[in-house]
Amino acid sequence: MAFADHPTARRSERSLLHRLYSAYGQEAVILVAMVALFVIVGLINPRFLSPENLNTIFSGNAYIAVAAIGMAMIIITGHIDVSVGALIGVLATISGTLAVAGYPVWVAWLVPILVGMAVNALVGAMVAYARIPSIVVTLGMLSILRGGLISVTGGAWISGLPKEFLIAQAKPLGVPAPIYFMVILTLAAAFWMRYSAFGRSLYAIGGNPEAARASGIPIERRTVMVFVIHGAFAGLATLLFATQLQIIQSTVPPNLELTVITAAVIGGVSILGGTGTVIGSTLAAILFAAIGSALIFTNVSAYWLRAVIGVLILVTVLADMIRRRRQGRA
Amino acid sequence: MTRFLRHETILAVLAVIVLGILAYQSDRFFTVDNLLNQGRLMTEVGLVAILMTFVIATGGIDLSVGSIIGLTAILTGVFWQSVGLPLPLAALAAIACGTFGGFANGVIITRFGVPPLIATLATLALYRGLAEGISQARSVRGYPEWFYVLGQGNVLGVPTQLWLLVLTAIVAAIVLGLTRWGRTVYAIGNNEVAARFSGLPVDRAKLAIYTASGFAAAVAGVILVSRVSTTRSDMGTGLELDAITAVVLGGTSIFGGRGTIAGTVLGLILIQALKNGLSLAGVKGDGTIVLIGVVLIVTILISNIVHRNGNR
């Protein structure tokens, strides 16, 4: 069941956090954690809350949140994609090359999205019809994309991007464009996942493929489609990633796929499939970025960041497992 | 049994074809020196992949091995240089820590029922984070000369670590293929609930396997330090994917229940031969990665088609 986290009849003397958790799930907990982080670190070092720093945290990491939306859908359907970081690297290079070559900017924005959809259509087809586990297909894809990118570009940077191409640097109404993208895409995806028949069917497939098939859901077609949508989100993420600086590094951002998967999982997407929301994954992506920034502003070496994130994932997952066991459906 | 062998047969044929083409392409490929050197380069991934075969055969996965390599490498340097332990003791202590890392994975997976993918994804970040935090991105160099025997020296004309790899492969093949313990591994991978109800020590077996996987990664970490003469916190990054590729290429089902050490070794040899042969033929390392990805997907594709036709 997708939204089985509603308050149970059995109410006991539990902490506020605990009740929030059982009522609204992982999203509420992340939101509380994020507010607490901003307040505490802001008290220690007020510059943490300066507009520049908030801009860095929110708009500089919006592309991770956007990529995590697609990843959340993939994981909810019961699959995984370890190649998304490599895909974003490839798409960024395609986008930058087109922009520098003098194509209209809308071509440079649109083509990566279409290529992302095409590549993932292939991945989805291999998963759905050839029945190769998604981790194997995307592992292979990771090698192909990463190796292909470096051997084609030689790791050279793309510079001289036209000014109008840099959409991530635009600030309509004083708010950075990536924030619009992140908020609108998250809300649209959340609404669609929750209320459309297609969205609901993804939960059904992830929760119990046999039952989903028996209830007439065309699993193969839906699987291909969800990979295609995930590819589109990777393309949109590329749009934000490739246009935030004056240059594009023609390499794959290291560990990006793990950051994206982690954001989805911390956001409450069960790796077993069938549960989770994209709002949680976006909140988690921003929480990571905020933690990274908080370490710097509290004079803790940023080299500890990954250890902190590792502990965070463990605590989240263990809490989830213990909660499920208490509810007797572990 | 024939069904089990089929994938390995496809792979063996493929390996022979690749080796043939490579030998034809470059006269430097089939020299004893080159082959032994490739064995040396293959050892770290090999040790990890052999134990990964057990992990995947139970239906699990261990993404944290690359990070355990990095952590062990860093701890070896820190215990030796900063704490002041004698180097053999420092290396042993580091291996103990890496092994504990594997044990911790096992506890999280068996005690709390966390899916292995998530548990080891978390510890991948945690162990790498510890390596980065402890080292603060400083490297340790200047190890004594004798230490390099492990990674750069020879015993009886064969690279030291290659002996270790061969020995590990033989022991692992016997354990997985011929013992009751090995059959427990397959039983868990095929149907964990059924294995539990048949009275098999499921949790104990899984705990032992993840601990052993951590141990293999830790040993690989020390060998890597000895081979490249330095210690850095990013060592072993991405090695988990290489190891998983070798195992899956070798015919172990990612869902568990099927797979052999012989297959994994064939997978390892095929990957290493491709890397080496292509670089001798003038293809850059990155082009090789592409080919490995293609080989992985195509092999599984062919194997899937053959199996489906055979079964239904």
Image: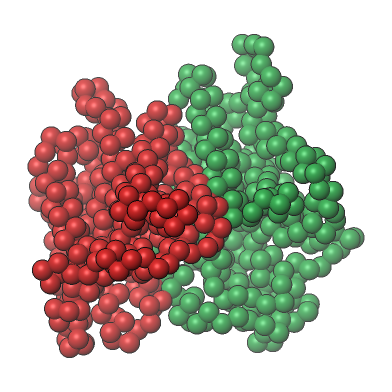
A304 and A265: which one is in front? A304
In the displayed orientation, state which residue is furthest to the right. Answer: A173
Is the residue A55 above or below the residue A202 in the image? below
Q: Position of residue A269 (x, y in %)?
A: 56, 40
The image shows residue A154 at horizontal and vertical percentages of 50, 82
Judged left or right of residue A209, residue B154 is left
Q: Between residue B265 and residue A133, name the one nearer to us.
A: B265
The residue shown at (49%, 44%) is: B122
Q: Name the spot of residue A259 as percent of width and height, x first.
A: 56, 53
Q: Left or right: A46 with respect to A131? A: right
For residue A218, side relative to residue A250 (left or right): left
- Where residue B246 sits, quadrant-wise, is bottom left
- Residue at 26% x, 59% y: name it: B46
Q: How many marks?
A: 0
| Colour logic | by chain
Q: Is residue B26 visible?
A: yes
Q: Colour of chain A?
A: green
Picture quadrant of residue A245: bottom right
Residue B248 visible in the shown view: no
Query: At 46% from the left edge and 45% from the top edge, which residue is drawn?
Result: B123
Towards the viewer: B54 or B193: B54
User: Residue drawn 42% across and 53% down?
Assistant: B84
What is the x, y in percent for residue A187? 72, 46
Letter of the chain in red = B
Q: Which is more toward the observer, A46 or B190?
A: A46
